[in-house]
Image: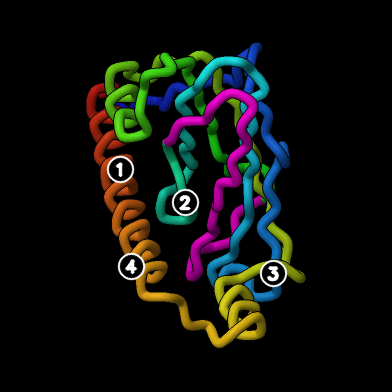
């Protein structure tokens, strides 16, 4: 009978120079599990060096990350949207997490080169920290809430150029998600 290989769990780095806010995510809304639930993770680079980051999650079916890879410049802050997907079970609190990785890069590195940097690094990084996830049925932000807010603020219509821009970003995000899944599958196969 074939033995199951134990997944080697990596520990948080002793030194993690990027700042994360909050240090734990709580997905909260009255329709938790039935509706997509959004939260935000603020990533700040307080250093004087440019860094590439990568964010992974414990379940790609349960969670989506709006910008799973990118560049963060010195003294820059980014808000990264994270989503608990509808139709998924609500797991036990603090069992699931997002893992945030970073590596220092040269100033000449462009955002389009980030995926290649992580492929070259093959799981080598300058730091990693987990952001644990909890769940709470109650008030919170859903996609439906956001749509209602937009309609209240205006007629909900966007200029065609803005609409086209959002559509292009959505396509790019889907491509990034596909690439990330391929990379993870490849990593898993290499570990075997």
Q: In this view, does 116 lie above or below 62?
A: above
What residue is drawn where x is 52% and y is 83%? 156
Residue 181's tag is: 1
Query: Nearer the N terminus, badge 3 or badge 4?
Result: 3
Residue 66's tag is: 2
Disc 1 and disc 3: Cα gap in Å?
A: 28 Å
Q: What stretch is highlighted in magenta?
A: 70-92
| Residue 72 part of the magenta segment | yes
Q: Quadrant of residue 46?
A: top right
Q: Mark 3 points at which residue?
A: 29
Q: Mark 4 points at which residue?
A: 164
Badge 4 local density, few (<14 within 10 Å), some, or many (20+)? few
What residue is drawn where x is 71% and y is 39%? 21
Task: Please name which of the two marks, 2 or 4, marks the residue nearer to the observer.
Answer: 4
Task: Please name which of the two marks, 1 or 2, marks the residue nearer to the observer.
Answer: 2
**Badge 2 element:** loop
What residue is drawn where x is 67% and y is 43%? 94
Badge 2 local density, few (<14 within 10 Å), some, or many (20+)? some
Badge 1 local density, few (<14 within 10 Å), some, or many (20+)? few
Residue 103 shown left or right of residue 145 in the figure: left
What residue is drawn where x is 70% and y is 63%? 28
Q: Where is residue 160 in the image (x, y as percent from the top left)?
A: 36, 75
Q: Position of residue 101 (x, y in %)?
A: 50, 26
Query: Nearer the N terminus, badge 1 or badge 2?
Result: 2
């Amino acid at each position: 009978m074939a033995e199951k290989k134990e997944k080697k769990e990596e520990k948080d780095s002793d030194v993690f120079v990027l700042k994360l806010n909050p240090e734990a995510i709580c997905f909260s809304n009255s329709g938790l599990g039935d509706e997509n639930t959004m939260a935000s993770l603020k990533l700040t680079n307080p250093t004087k060096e440019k860094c590439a980051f990568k964010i992974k999650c414990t379940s790609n079916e349960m969670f989506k990350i709006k910008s799973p890879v990118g560049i963060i410049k010195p003294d820059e802050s980014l808000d990264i949207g994270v989503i608990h997907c509808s139709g998924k079970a609500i797991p036990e609190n603090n069992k699931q997490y997002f893992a945030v990785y970073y590596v220092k890069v040269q100033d000449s590195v462009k955002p389009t080169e980030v995926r290649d940097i992580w492929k070259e690094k093959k799981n080598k990084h300058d730091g990693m920290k987990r952001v644990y996830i909890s769940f709470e049925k109650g008030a919170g932000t859903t996609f439906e809430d956001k749509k209602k807010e937009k309609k209240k603020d205006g007629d909900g219509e966007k200029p065609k150029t803005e609409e086209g821009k959002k559509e292009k970003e959505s396509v790019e995000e889907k491509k990034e998600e596909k690439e990330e899944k391929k990379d993870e599958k490849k990593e898993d196969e290499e570990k075997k």
